[in-house]
Amino acid sequence: MAEPVSEAAVPLLRSVGRADAQLEKLLPERDSLQRVLGHLESVTTEPLLVEEAFERRRLWQDAGLFYSNSGRLLEAIELF
């Protein structure tokens, strides 16, 4: 079941969705952290980590910020 998405988190969810539609669907779900982490780990390769480091691709960061901006701070901390 999806949690309501706060107005502050909507742009982050859209940003994630442009890069990964499955992650966009997972993030708003209640208790989604383990599924989100599993998904991120399965799609993250060494070249993609380089993209994350230079912030050309920000799935990990935006997923954590989505949790934070949704008031789901424990999930944000665990993801970061």
Image (cartoon, grey):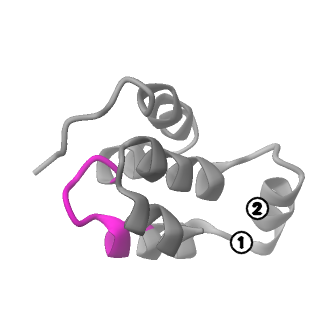
Q: Is residue 55 shown in magenta?
A: no
Residue drawn at 83 percent across, 54 percent down: 51
Q: Give me the disc on residue 45.
A: 1
What numbered label is drawn on residue 48? 2
Count of picture labels? 2
Residue 9 position (above or below residue 31): above
- Image position of 33 with respect to 22: above or below: below
Q: Quadrant of residue 60?
A: bottom right
Q: What's the magenta bit mostly, secondary-structure-wise?
A: loop
In the image, taking residue 2 as reference, residue 18 lies left or right, namely right
30 drawn magenta? yes
**x%, y% of residue 24?**
39, 43
- Left or right of 63 on screen, residue 48: right
Name the element at disc 1. Answer: loop
- Position of the C terminus, as image quadrant, is bottom right
Q: Position of residue 28 (x, y in %)?
A: 28, 46
Residue 58 at x, y = what percent?
A: 69, 48
Which residue sits at x=37%, y=23%?
Answer: 7
What residue appears at the point 33 percent right and 71 percent down from the top-left corner? 35
SS at mark 2 in the image: helix
Quick check: 59 left or right of 47?
left
Question: Hey, what amino acid is under mark 2?
Answer: Leu
- Residue 70 position (above or below residue 51): above
* Quarter-of-image position of residue 8: top left
Q: Are marks 2 and 1 in contact (CB under 8 Å)?
A: yes
Range covered by the magenta-colored residues: 27-36
Of 77 and 36, which appears nearest the observer? 77
Q: Quadrant of residue 53?
A: bottom right
Q: Residues within 10 Å of mark 1 (few under 14, many from 20)?
A: few
Horizontal arrangement in the rendering, residue 36 relative to residue 58 (left or right) = left
